[in-house]
Image (spheres, grey):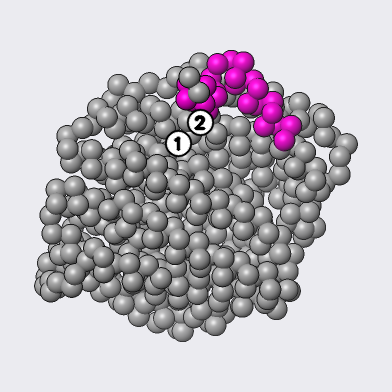
């Protein structure tokens, strides 16, 4: 439990940086590049991500769990590491060759795609799965944070107008590569070089493919949306879609920080046949997550119209009508991710995990093919919400049916009512205020006071009762 607290601390620092830095960089990038520039970056990035996916072959999740199991049983960690690494290196080189062949034969904007190839090359050096598996999050968190700070200053200093779109692409892609390379010096503490046969390394494909299949499906209901919108509607629409989701994704990341930390710990518990302890911990973590995610959803519904004009700029005013629809994902996505990372993956129920994302992918593709040609941009918004809902529904239903876990409806209902009242009252009190950062700060302070006050009165505030019990 001490390791969990320490790892959560490091992950929180890293995730806080991922929240704070975009608050500065998103307005700069949005105003400088505009919908077309933001869209071009995200569209070319979405194409490169398919090759990142195939190069990784599910190793992030498979390697995390494989290392965690070997580490818990005190097995040969070095051999396991090199077998997985060589297998991933073989796949990365193969798909880099395929990527460049397609780019130079078929695609426009070749220079953008060439720069985006750095994100594929970064997969070769990615050993985050190893450090996650041994529950050492300090190395990866601090390395990523260092690179994020460098990237942050480069964006603030050099990204000024639409002509800097290529430079922005280079900064982002280089940052991904450097963040992976920086952790390699720390490996020598845990890993010694060990010769392993290519045959044994390639046998890792059988284990990783179970984690790769859902990654493909996830790509088909997340990344595919950007590709389809770019191909059917245009790059500016990709810019609108991406920025509409950006703040949601920031909050989803911080809400699910605990999941990343708990995956290797839960895998270790499963290796020790302690499934009951997994369920007990999830009862605490899921309700704590909902305590935060529900008010954050209502918080987005509180501030969005006062936020967009100054934060994203006048070129993005269209997304004022989009953000309220996507706010529900702040609750839906983290819940589904928690069930998969804390339960389905650690205990090896990969079939159920695969089922959820395959259903989500199929629904997303069908919905997009029907809606995009008929209602355009709004088709991808509706498809995204429907797909994410069904993914979370399938995972949660499987989890509840297989265990003794029950949602505390009184707590969840109290969080929802408190969040709704918080939203209505705060919007009423600030309705005549201008769209500015100061207005949003005032809104957040009012909203937090109302929400925390109501949840304390309703006796469902876990932070208040934790502090109260600690003081006794």
**Given this view, does label 1 or label 2 mark the residue nearer the observer?**
2
Question: Which secondary structure type mostly characterizes the magenta part of the structure?
Answer: helix
Residue 415 image-quadrant placement: top right
Query: Mark 2 highlights which residue?
Result: 290
Query: Which element is circle 2 on?
Result: helix
- Give how far across and how far down residue 363 sits, in percent: 45, 44
Q: Residue at x 55, y 40 (%)?
A: 330
Q: Is any atom of residue 147 visible in this view?
A: yes
Q: CA distance from mark 1 to mark 2?
A: 8 Å
Vertical relation: 433 (above or below) 417: below
Q: Residue at x 55, y 34 (%)?
A: 292
Whether residue 378 appears in magenta in the rendering, the answer is no
Q: Nearer the viewer, residue 418 or 356?
A: 418
Residue 329 image-quadrant placement: top right
Query: Is the C-beta separation of discs 1 and 2 under 8 Å?
Result: yes
Query: Mark 1 highlights which residue?
Result: 335
Highlighted range, magenta:
445-470
- Give how far across and how far down residue 214 sits, in percent: 34, 51
The disc placed on residue 396 is: none
Query: Which element is circle 1 on?
Result: helix
Locate the N terminus and report the quarter of the image it occupies.
top left
**Could you classify mark 1 by the number of other residues whose Cα lies within 10 Å: few (under 14), some (14-19), or many (20 or more)?**
many
């Amino acid at each position: 439990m001490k390791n969990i607290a320490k790892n959560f601390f490091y992950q929180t620092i890293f995730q806080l940086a991922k929240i704070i830095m975009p608050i500065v960089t998103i307005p700069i990038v949005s105003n400088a590049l505009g919908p077309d520039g933001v869209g071009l970056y995200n569209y070319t990035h979405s194409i490169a991500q398919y090759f990142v996916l195939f190069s990784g072959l599910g190793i992030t999740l498979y390697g995390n769990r494989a290392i965690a199991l070997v580490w818990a049983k005190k097995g040969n960690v070095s051999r396991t590491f090199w077998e997985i690494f060589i297998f991933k290196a073989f796949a990365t080189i193969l798909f880099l060759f395929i990527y460049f062949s397609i780019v130079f034969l078929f695609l426009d904007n070749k220079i953008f795609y060439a720069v985006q190839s750095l994100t594929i090359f970064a997969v070769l050096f990615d050993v985050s799965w190893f450090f996650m598996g041994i529950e050492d999050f300090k190395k990866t968190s601090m390395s990523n944070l260092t690179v994020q700070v460098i990237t942050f200053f480069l964006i603030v200093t050099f990204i000024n107008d639409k002509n800097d779109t290529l430079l922005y692409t280079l900064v982002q892609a280089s940052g991904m590569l450097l963040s992976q390379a920086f952790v390699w010096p720390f490996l020598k503490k845990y890993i010694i070089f060990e010769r392993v046969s290519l045959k044994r390394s390639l046998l890792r494909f059988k284990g990783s493919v179970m984690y790769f299949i859902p990654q493909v499906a996830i790509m088909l209901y997340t990344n595919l949306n950007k590709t389809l919108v770019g191909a059917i509607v245009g790059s500016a629409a990709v810019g609108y879609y991406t920025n509409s989701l950006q703040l949601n994704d920031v909050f989803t990341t911080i809400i699910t920080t605990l999941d990343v930390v708990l995956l290797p710990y839960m895998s270790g518990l499963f290796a020790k046949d302690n499934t009951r302890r997994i369920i007990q911990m999830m009862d605490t973590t899921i309700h704590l997550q909902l305590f935060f995610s529900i008010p954050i959803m209502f918080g987005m519904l509180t501030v969005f119209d006062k936020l967009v004009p100054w934060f994203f700029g006048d070129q993005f005013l269209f997304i004022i009508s989009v953000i309220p629809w996507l706010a529900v994902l702040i609750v839906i996505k983290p819940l589904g991710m928690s069930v998969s990372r804390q339960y389905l993956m650690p205990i090896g129920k990969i079939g159920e995990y695969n089922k959820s994302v395959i259903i989500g992918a199929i629904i997303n593709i069908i919905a997009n093919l029907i809606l995009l040609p008929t209602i355009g941009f709004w088709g991808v918004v509706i498809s995204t919400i429907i797909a994410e809902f069904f993914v979370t529904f399938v995972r949660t239903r499987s989890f509840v049916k297989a265990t003794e876990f029950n949602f505390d409806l009184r707590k969840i209902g109290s969080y929802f009512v408190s969040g709704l009242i918080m939203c209505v009252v705060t919007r009423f009190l600030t309705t005549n205020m201008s769209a500015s950062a100061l207005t949003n700060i005032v809104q957040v302070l009012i909203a937090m006071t109302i929400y925390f006050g109501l949840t304390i009165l309703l006796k469902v505030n876990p932070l208040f009762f934790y502090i109260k019990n600690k003081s006794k």
